[in-house]
Amino acid sequence: MLDRAVIDALFPADLPEPGHWEQQYPPRSLPEGAEVTRFGPSPTGFVHIGGIYVATIDRDVATRSGGVYLVRVEDTDQSREVEGALDQFARAFSYFHIASDEDGDRGAYGPYRQSQRERVYLTYVRHLLRQGKAYLCFATKDELADITARQQAAKVPPGYYGSWAIWRDAEPEAVAAKLAEGVPYVVRFRAPEDAAGQRARFTDAIRGELEHEANRNDAVILKTSASSPRLPTYHFAHAVDDHLMRVTLVIRGDEWISSVPLHQQLFDALGFEHPRYAHIAPLMKQIPGGKRKLSKRKDPEASVDFYIQAGYPADAVLYYLRGLANGRLAELPLAEALAAPIQLDQCGVAGPLVDLVKLEDISADHIATRTGAQVLDAVRVWAAEHDPELVTVLDADTDLVLRAIAVEREGVENPRKDLRKWSDFRPAYGFFFPALFTPLAGPGDERVQPLGVAPEVAAAFAKDLADGYEHLDDQQEWFNQIRELAAKHGFAPNNKEYKKNPDAYPGSIREASQLVRVAMTGSTRSPDLHAVARALGADEVLRRLRALSAS
């Protein structure tokens, strides 16, 4: 074991003792049973929808217990940090209402970025070195590769442990010599001597009693002395932070289950109380022949930005995710499900499937319950970021926007559900707005051709309709003017008659109606024609009909 003076010389002279940090970050004054949870995103990539899933559970558990939910950015691996990731974190947390209860301005347990906590970690690394629970390791990459090769040849478990840990029991003189030469080193945790063959046991709040092979490896806890700042590995940083931030419940993905034995050893070596754990099953994707984890690399819907850019309402996404966590919540109406607690013991151990079709149905149902004004506000907020031209259109004629949204939504038993996300507004409602709609270029327009009506018949029919058009309130009376003109221009009164002798007619009343529909909306599919006409107004209806009759 190194002399204390040698150890202390490796660290800043003014580095505080552990007691300083214990005093700065005292136990929280919270009600009995209150949970402190944390979500720890890493800026080595963008937030996965699975991260929002876990953070939603984190926030729910903490808030409902009278505790604290915090976000701690785990950025110790600065070489892999992705530019823009932190901005995306903030955008995602704001959109889905999972911003931290504490941050730089609101919270006495920060900083909440691990890269800003170097002195805290160095205190506890020095503490372990002084106690002989950690040691300096000068092993080179070549030496580590040689150890691995010899382990493979001997068919023993790989790792840096026992007799394979060549610096574990090095003589102090050898260590001092390396330090004198200025050779870079890392600090490794000294795993317990009796770890080999032992089993680590713990109770998971979701999975119950679990056990795993105890950790035998002397894990690196402080990265190379050649780097600045001197940052720890994730394993060590999270142990120190969870203790000092007084985290009581660690909710995280089940890929971390195998790390619990190491984490338990670190907590014991540091003299910290263990937090409780809840390991969440990952979100899955259905593929031919089975399923796999939802992948940021392969699946666009894995990225949080996919949902924000498309404009899925946050409440609809959160409702869906809560239903994946606890199946009973999927059976409740949205407002009730958002208000009901997530129960950890009701989370499944098999990963739930992400079904975008189901999400879109949920989203459409939710949007259908919103008033026209609420839809307008939400679309405008989304468009301000993602479709600025649409904002200009919405602001130019708010009354038209509200009339358009009201079509087949207000005053009906089964409202339209053609909006599944805010990005659907332009394709679903764009035709209502002159600035977004391109009138027909006469009867030969490609949008008219699929109807199979001769151009001269289509033009004459549209001209007569425009010349005598009446903008009537009564739906039946309004449609009768189309029916009467259709008969005048030789259209069959119904499809049955038309099919009996198709050569005798230019089409049926269906084709005549579709001419009006295409002229007014640009498509053969649209909401009720009379309702569309009332929303557009007489002048705009006439402008569009005359565009069809133009030669």
Image (cartoon, rainbow, N blue to C red):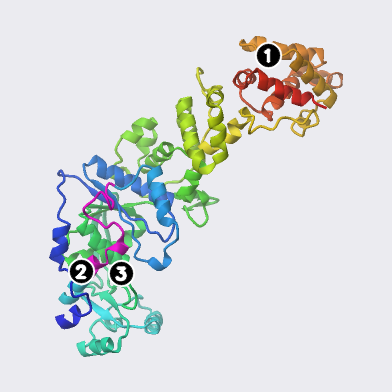
Picture layout, residue 162 above or below residue 273 = below
| Helix, strand or loop under label 1 | helix
**What residue do we see at 30% from left, 62% from top?**
114
Q: What range of the chain is rendered magenta? A: 101-124
Numbered circle sitting on residue 231: 3
Q: How many residues crowd mark 3 within 10 Å: few (<14), some (14–19), many (20+)?
A: many
Picture layout, residue 505 above or below residue 283 = above
Three-letter amino acid code of the residue under disc 2: Tyr
- Pointer 2: what residue? 124
Q: Nearer the viewer, residue 364 or 262?
A: 364
Q: Nearer the viewer, residue 226 or 273?
A: 226
| Alpha carbon distance from label 3 to label 2 | 12 Å
Q: Nearer the viewer, residue 205 or 551?
A: 551
- Pointer 1: what residue? 479
Given contact means CB atoms under 8 Å apart, are the residues at marks 1 and 3 in contact?
no
Three-letter amino acid code of the residue under disc 3: Leu
